[in-house]
Image (cartoon, grey):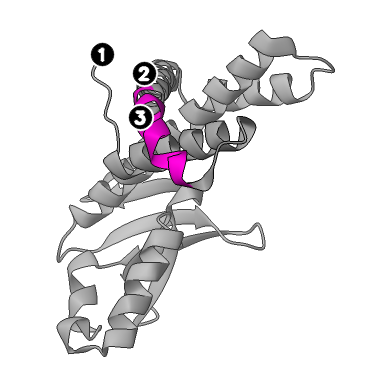
Amino acid sequence: MNATIDCEDLMSLAWSFARQEHWSRRMPAGTLRSLFPAALKAAWAEMKRRAVMAAERAAEAARLAENGLGALRAELISLENTDRLGHEGMERLRAVQDAIRLAEEHDQRAKRDLIASAKGRICAVTFTKKDGSERTMKVQPAALKFHIKGDAATDAGRKGAVTRAARHPHLLPVWDVQKRAPRSVNLATVSRITVDGRTQEYA
């Protein structure tokens, strides 16, 4: 299993280990650098351990994600309502939470791609609004680019768009055909998408 280690994090941890050792041994101020080689070796071993654990956790999340969101959410509720989980229970809880995040990301990418596949045609997207009501919006994916500034936007506008996309990856900007205005669809609450007369439903 390949483990990727960030060099900046490695050096930061090494100096942290060196300073900790320097303080615990009450050494003179000028001797800190002499502790760095051993600290770097220890930091390398620790970073490798963390990277391997992260990779194993990601692999387990991917395996669990295949169970589907419904089964994962049901298990999450069961675990959260358990009085005492213990070490194994806590590990399982974290694994299920990771798997849910992974499954949700996959689910939202699939919805995004399906809506985009309509291009200049009109597709119907059914989702749940913030107030709990259901709405079906007719959208035309390719039309949105003609109603936003894009490269003509100010630097602040472009940076704002990037920030919004990073903070809210589940929100998809679309062109509402009926309202003739740009809107956002919460991909996390989309329950049905119809493109070219074919409907895809989501749990």
Q: Secondary structure at mark 1?
A: loop
Measured as percent of width and height from the top left, residue 26 is found at 62, 35
Which is closer to the viewer, label 1 or label 3?
A: 3
Spatial CA distance of label 1 from label 3 is 22 Å
Residue 65 in sight = yes
| Rendering quarter of residue 11 | top left
Please report contact status of discs 2 and 3: CB closer than 8 Å, yes or no: no
Identity of the residue drawn at 38% across and 56% down: 125
Label disc, if present, on residue 1 of the rendered structure: 1
Stretch in magenta: 30-41
Classify the position of the N terminus by image quarter.
Answer: top left
| Rendering quarter of residue 58 | top left
Relative depth, front residue between 124 and 165: 165
**For marks 1 and 3 on the same chain, the one whose residue lies earlier in the sequence:** 1
Q: Amino acid at mark 1?
A: Met
Identity of the residue drawn at 56% across and 36% down: 27
Please report contact status of discs 2 and 1: CB closer than 8 Å, yes or no: yes
Label disc, if present, on residue 40 of the rendered structure: 3
Q: Secondary structure at mark 2?
A: helix
Spatial CA distance of label 2 from label 3 is 18 Å
The residue sitting at the right extreme is 83
